Image: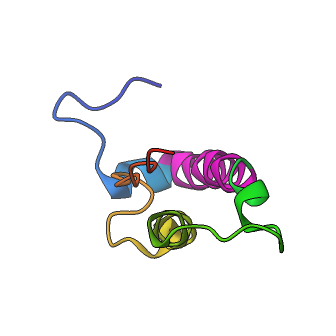
Amino acid sequence: TAFPEEGPSEIWLEKKGFTRVLESEIRIKRNLLLSETDWRFRSDLSPSQEWIDYCQALRDIPQQESFPTNVQWPIQPSE
């Protein structure tokens, strides 16, 4: 199915069933990014506030107003 010429609206995406697929794909990516940070939160390490905020921003992605059609991904802190 081709996207409408003016771009996909949320209603169009929902009708075509793409919204649920998109939500699932975003959650998979988010969970992968979170799993890559797990080692920073071991009991013998103290993550920086930047890493704590980054992980919280990843967890908050599904609550973004434009989720799932326009996700604002947080920027991973530098080491």
Residue 74, magenta (yes or no): no
Residue farthest along the left direction in this orientation? 6
* Quadrant of res 47: bottom right
- Rendering colour mode: rainbow
Q: How many marks?
A: 0
Look at 39% across and 49% down and name the residue there.
75
Q: Is residue 37 above or below residue 64?
A: above
Q: Residue at x 38, y 54 (%)?
A: 71
Which residue in the rendered view is the most extreme toward the front?
44
Say which of 53 and 46 sits in front. 46
Observer-nearest residue: 71 or 58?
58
12 in relation to 5, above or below:
below
Residue at position x 67%, y 56% from top? 34
* Residue 49 on image: x %, y %: 47, 73
Nearer the observer, 24 or 54? 54
Residue 41 at what x, y percent from top left?
74, 67
Query: Is 30 a magenta residue?
Result: yes
Q: Is residue 29 left or right of residue 68?
A: right
For the stretch drawn in magenta, the main secondary structure is helix
Q: Residue at position x 66%, y 71% from top?
A: 46
Q: Quick one: which residue is furthest to the right in this view?
A: 43
Say which quarter of the image contains residue 40: bottom right
Residue 72, placed above or below residue 32: below
| Residue 73, percent from left and from top | 40, 51
Q: Which residues are magenta?
A: 16-35
| Drawn side of residue 41 relative to residue 2, left or right | right
